[in-house]
Amino acid sequence: MKNLKPISISLAVIILVILIIQNLDVLTKNEVFRINLLFATFQSPPFQLYLLLLVCFVAGFLFAYLSGFIQRRRLKKTIKTLSHSQRQAEKELDALRNLPIVESRTPAGNNQSSEQDEE
């Protein structure tokens, strides 16, 4: 299993290099993006397609990193809250364990309270 991850990463890189080499003419082609709205028209300067792909990849990576970072922060806060609750519960349990044992001496056949409830 330890060898599976490096092998799969190497295989993915090899496939990526093959795709780039085979499509190099498409990736280096200059493109212009136009947006036609009802009130305005926007046009980008000419740029190569690989630049767009690189920007999208970096933006996706940053988005995933930030969302993971936010989730880690929330989970750390939850862990801190639960640890505090656990410490409080352990303190309460220790206090209850240290209470003296008091036995109540009631005779086994004395059920006056139940007889009074029936009347």
Image (cartoon, helix red, strand yellow):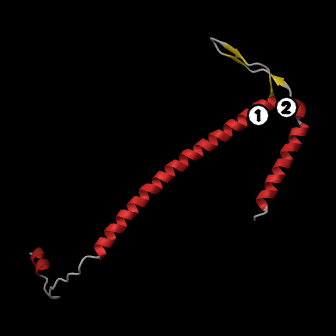
Residue at 14% across, 83% down: 111
Q: Is residue 78 left or right of residue 51?
A: left
Kind of residue sitting beneath label 2: Leu
User: Marks 2 and 1: CB-CB under 8 Å?
Assistant: yes
Mark 1 = which residue?
Answer: 53
Residue 15 to residue 45: above or below: below
Classify residue 44 by image quadrant.
Answer: top right
Q: List x then y, in percent, for residue 59.
A: 67, 36
Residue 15 to residue 5: above or below: above
* Separation of residues labelled 2 and 1 (CA atoms): 9 Å
Kind of residue sitting beneath label 1: Leu
Q: Give residue 20's mark.
A: none
Q: Give residue 27's mark.
A: 2
Q: List x then y, in percent, for residue 21.
A: 90, 39
Classify residue 96 by image quadrant.
Answer: bottom left
Q: Is residue 24 left or right of residue 89?
A: right
Residue at 40% across, 59% down: 84
User: Looking at the image, is mark 2 or mark 1 earlier in the sequence?
Assistant: 2
